[in-house]
Image (cartoon, rainbow, N blue to C red):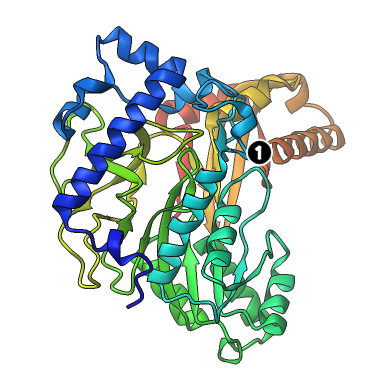
């Protein structure tokens, strides 16, 4: 099995933990000196970086949350001057105040190296042709995967968000051997290939590296059976670096976390107390080598567990389970994070719409569909059919534009929707993920 960096990926745990502590002390000093948010956080608790002499001391430090990042928009969490930031991305949730993430040149080199690790763990080599079907833009995912693939010398096709027919044509003509996308998009490609009468045996495709969504072993089996490929999971958090935090090896018995650059913890989401290995809780991550945007004890909102037993592949890095679910009300559709509060904000901006709604997420075949039940004022609801339809179309267009994906709209009387919400949740996700 290919191991890109045996010195770090197979490092004895005692040496690794010493390296983590040294890097952690450096990070704490950097954020205390350069990030006013952390300096205020530590001072309020009479903590100085020198107090952290062991991991047990570190676990006494406060957490960083998504709300903290929003409160310091846009550059308040940067630990270097803007002139040293060579790349800026934003997190893919649709809040009014996005999280702005900066990268120094050093950060980009580290990021590419970590992505190259999990590509190598999946036996991707310089002989491969990698088709990246994540959208390029402010979202960081595609860029991290792109630069990691180039680092190992593979040929990269930045297919981005091309239509499925175009993606399939690229696979055929350019002899794609590795597909990088969300798992749901891989199933959409399989559906379309079947409709077009294209036999996957006639493709060169061998592997799929999938992320951006929560998916299951059942979904893995469906993709492998329909596309005739091996599939590998990977995990990223856009606030930290996007993909590159963890990925599966050929054993596929958990995702190896790059512990020399990311310090993982599992906590009880209610109490914040640390949980032992094997217990499921909220994943908390700390960057150990980021220059521009270091984060200390960042609560990801993802539920998972950790194991520290060495893997059969030879790696000694901790492995995380697949993410079971999220703790918050973020909805992930086609790799895009949707915050329900942003839907409410959009509705309040449109005259005639009440800030009362229900979100329905369904899977029709292999295609995700998001439908919004929106309460409207009486004069809209009882208007002429043509005006009613025009209003619904205007609302659908605005929601789709601001959320970044297609949204179906059903207009309802407020009192009818109020009754529905009395007996059921605001967000209904019927997908089997």
| Quadrant position of residue 216 | bottom left
Q: Closest to the observer: 55 or 219?
A: 55
121 w.r.t. 245: above or below: below
x and y, in percent, of residue 237 in the image: 45, 44
Quadrant of the drawing holding the N terminus: bottom left
Q: Residue at x 44, y 39 (%)?
A: 290
Q: Closest to the observer: 92 or 369?
A: 92
430 w.r.t. 273: above or below: below
Q: Closest to the observer: 205 or 73?
A: 73
Q: Residue at x 17, y 63 (%)?
A: 310
x and y, in percent, of residue 340 in the image: 54, 31
Decide if residue 280 is in sight here.
Answer: no
219 w.r.t. 102: above or below: below
Q: Is disc 1 surrounded by few (<14), some (14 to 19) or many (20+) residues within 10 Å?
A: many
| Quadrant position of residue 289 | top left
Judging by the rendered image, the residue that carries numbered circle 1 is: 403
Residue 41 as seen in the image, left or right of residue 73: left
At mark 1, the secondary structure is helix
x and y, in percent, of residue 167 in the image: 69, 71
x and y, in percent, of residue 66 in the image: 45, 28
Quadrant of the drawing holding the C terminus: bottom left
Residue 78 as seen in the image, left or right of residue 49: right
Q: Residue at x 41, y 64 (%)?
A: 118
């Amino acid at each position: 099995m290919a191991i890109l960096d045996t010195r770090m990926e197979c490092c004895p745990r005692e040496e690794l933990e010493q390296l983590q502590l040294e890097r952690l002390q450096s990070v704490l000093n950097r954020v205390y000196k350069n990030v006013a948010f952390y300096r205020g956080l530590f001072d309020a608790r009479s903590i100085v970086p020198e107090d952290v002499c062991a991991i047990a001391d570190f676990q006494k430090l406060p957490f960083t949350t998504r709300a903290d990042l929003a409160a310091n928009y846009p550059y308040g969490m940067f630990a270097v001057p803007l002139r040293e930031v060579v790349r800026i991305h934003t997190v893919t949730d649709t809040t009014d105040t996005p999280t702005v993430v900066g990268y120094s040149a050093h950060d980009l080199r580290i990021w590419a190296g970590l992505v190259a690790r999990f590509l190598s763990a999946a036996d991707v080599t310089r002989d491969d042709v990698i088709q990246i079907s994540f959208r390029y833009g402010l979202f960081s995912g595609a860029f991290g995967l792109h630069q990691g693939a180039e680092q190992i010398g593979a040929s990269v096709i930045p297919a981005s968000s091309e239509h499925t027919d175009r993606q399939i044509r690229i696979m055929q003509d350019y002899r794609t051997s590795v597909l990088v996308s969300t798992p749901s998009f891989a199933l959409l490609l399989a559906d379309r290939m079947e409709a077009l009468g294209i036999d996957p045996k006639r493709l060169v495709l061998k592997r799929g590296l999938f992320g951006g969504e929560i998916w299951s072993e059942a979904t893995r089996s469906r993709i492998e059976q329909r596309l005739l490929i091996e599939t590998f999971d990977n995990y990223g958090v856009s606030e930290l670096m996007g993909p590159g935090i963890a990925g599966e090896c050929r054993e596929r018995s958990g995702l190896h976390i790059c512990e020399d650059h990311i310090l993982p913890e599992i906590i009880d989401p209610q109490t914040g107390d640390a949980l032992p290995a094997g217990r499921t809780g909220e994943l908390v991550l700390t960057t150990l080598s980021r220059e521009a945007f270091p984060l200390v004890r960042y609560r990801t909102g993802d539920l998972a567990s950790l194991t520290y037993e060495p893997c059969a592949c030879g790696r000694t890095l901790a492995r995380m389970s697949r993410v079971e679910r999220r703790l918050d009300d973020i909805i992930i559709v086609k790799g895009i994070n949707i915050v329900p509060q942003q839907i409410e904000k959009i509705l309040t901006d449109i005259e005639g719409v009440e800030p009362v709604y229900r979100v329905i997420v369904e899977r029709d075949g292999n295609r995700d569909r998001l439908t919004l039940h929106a309460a409207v004022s009486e004069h809209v609801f009882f208007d002429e059919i043509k005006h009613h339809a025009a209003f619904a179309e205007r609302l659908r267009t605005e929601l789709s534009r601001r959320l970044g994906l297609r949204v179906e709209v059903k207009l309802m009387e407020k009192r009818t929707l109020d009754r529905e919400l009395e007996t059921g949740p605001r967000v209904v996700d019927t997908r089997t993920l």
